[in-house]
Image (spheres, rainbow, N blue to C red):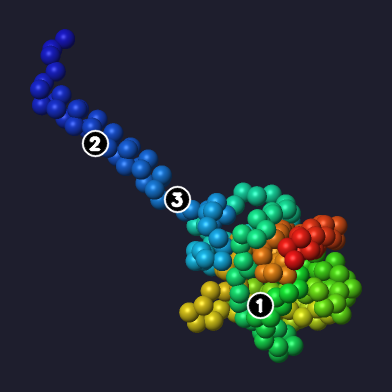
Amino acid sequence: MAPMDKNKRKFILLGGGLLAVFALAAILLKLLGGHADPAGDPGPLATRQPDTTTTAETPGTASDSVTGAPEDAVETGETAGSENTATGGEYQAPDFTLTNNRGETHSLSDFRGRVIVLNFWASWCPPCRSEMPMLNAWYQEIAERDDIVFMAVDLTDGGRETRDAADRFISGEGYSFPYYYDERQAGMPSAAELYYVQSIPATWIIAPNFDLYYQHRGILTREQLDHYLAGVQSYAAGAD
């Protein structure tokens, strides 16, 4: 067998080297080009800047929650409907100001001193629709109480969800609770962005001292709601 030509050996070695460089570059791009999961960031929710706009995937998903993150966002991987406990006393609830269907404008901080049930929803979201009868029945029980408030926030993006769509849904179902339009204001993050809402329905339980206490992703049952409220009320009593 004739010895390999020197030039031919050079080309083979050069080609192998280039392939190795391209493979290494691809691995580095994969490692460095991913998106960070906001839920894995240990920083306080009240001080982190929003890094995603809450939009929506195709309506009609028959799961416990509908993903509300953009296509390039990373899912949290948490089970829909699971309980997520915020460290009591460590994170304060981010404040925001919205107008509701009754024409009233309120800041979340207007309700400081009361337990706040903060629920994010949209009329096109089937899981949100599923939990609404329970939430409405519960609201009718607590509507006259001065120690607790229900703040239902509609993801009113002006496209998939409009004020008219939300109003038609609530009116058609005969629900009585007030609900707030989460419309983007110039230069300001939406309420959903402040609370890192990546799927709906999503519910936060906020203690009277404005501590974030519980976060629940997915359909909320009455048993779960009662459990969370008992926990936060016990925590509030101990914090006094």
**Percent position (x, y) of residue 6?**
10, 22
In the picture as drawn, the residue positioned furthest to the bottom comes out as 103
Q: Is residue 77 left or right of residue 228?
A: left
User: In the image, what residue occupies the spot 40% across and 50% down?
Assistant: 33
**Percent position (x, y) of residue 138?**
86, 70
* Amino acid type for the residue under numbered disc 3: Gly
Q: Could you tell me which secondary element the residue under label 3 belongs to?
A: loop
Instruction: Name the residue tied to disc 1.
Output: 109
Q: Could you tell me which secondary element the residue under label 2 belongs to?
A: helix
Q: CA distance from mark 3 to mark 1?
A: 36 Å
Instruction: Name the residue tied to disc 2.
Output: 18
Quadrant (top left, top right, bottom left, bottom right) of the N terminus: top left
Q: Is residue 106 above or below residue 61?
A: below
Instruction: Name the residue tied to disc 3.
Output: 34
In the picture as drawn, the residue positioned furthest to the top comes out as 1
Q: Could you tell me which secondary element the residue under label 1 belongs to?
A: helix
